[in-house]
Image (cartoon, rainbow, N blue to C red):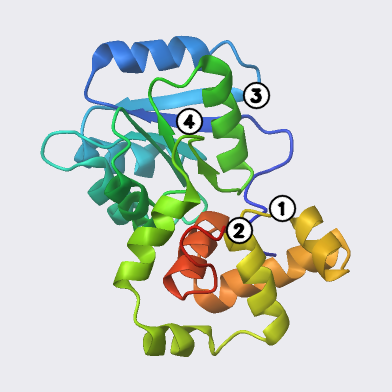
Amino acid sequence: MGYEMTRVENAPIKVLLVDDEGLVRSGFRMLLETEPDIEVVGEATTGGEALARARETRPDVVLMDIRMPVMDGICATAELMKIRGLEETRVLILTTYETDAYVFDALQAGASGFLLKDAGPAELLHAIRVVAAGDALLAPRITRRLIGQFASARAASQAAEERLAVLTQREREVLTLVGRGLSNEEIGAQLFLSPATARTHVSHALGKLGARDRAQLVVIAYETGLVEPGGG
């Protein structure tokens, strides 16, 4: 089974709220608790507390603020990715900042999504459900072009080619299309494959590249030059 299938069907999405502002957490909790398919299982005010609460509650999704005392959200995300038993936990970064570097750093740390705090309630709920389902989520105002600019600046072509050597040609093609934001259905249509076959290729790429989810594949596609900045 690939990493995309991460939750028991029909089970509520368990969410951990991480933000150093009490009013922000209260607002999120009030909104989420009105949704029958979402359950708030805990809160934390720092990155360190987030790691402890995550171990206790094993959430499906962590709503993670970036700027917090002691340990910020990006560092906390990177540390959370190392915890055994939380391999299927997804992190959705919430922030008031849309600085380009944060987007790339958060996704590289292991986040599955990035959303601005001024997003509306419907957008936040949609983001939680998308990330819980194993898909990548970027705020509409934060484009893949920006991710590409940071990724290309940090990638060396030789290292990129070595990294991609584990993939078949078809898997490279699929990875390129994932990097461009296509769904399994869209990938299948473009490559004349069934959606199930496209999904299988995505799962193989995830496993071979050691990626947790589609968000990580997007980063890898840019890092290795399969998708050029501005070409997504």
Q: Nearer the viewer, residue 32 or 92?
A: 92
Question: What element does badge 1 sit on?
Answer: loop
The numbered dot on residue 183 is 1
Q: CA distance from mark 4 to mark 3?
A: 11 Å
Residue at 22% across / 24% down in the picture? 20
Q: Residue 71: percent from the left, percent from the top?
A: 16, 43
Residue at 58% across / 18% down in the picture? 122
Q: Which residue is mark 2?
A: 180
Question: Quick check: can you spot residue 82?
Answer: no
Q: Earlier in the sequence, mark 2 or mark 3?
A: 3
Q: Which residue is mark 4?
A: 15
Residue at 52% across / 16% down in the picture? 121
Quadrant the N terminus occupies: bottom right
Q: CA distance from mark 2 to mark 1?
A: 9 Å
Q: Residue furthest left?
A: 70
Q: CA distance from mark 2 to mark 3?
A: 30 Å
Few, some or many C-alpha atoms within 10 Å of disc 3 (few <14, some 14-19, many ≥20)?
few
Q: Which residue is mark 3?
A: 37
Going by the image, does 187 lie left or right of 224? right
Amino acid beneath label 2: Arg
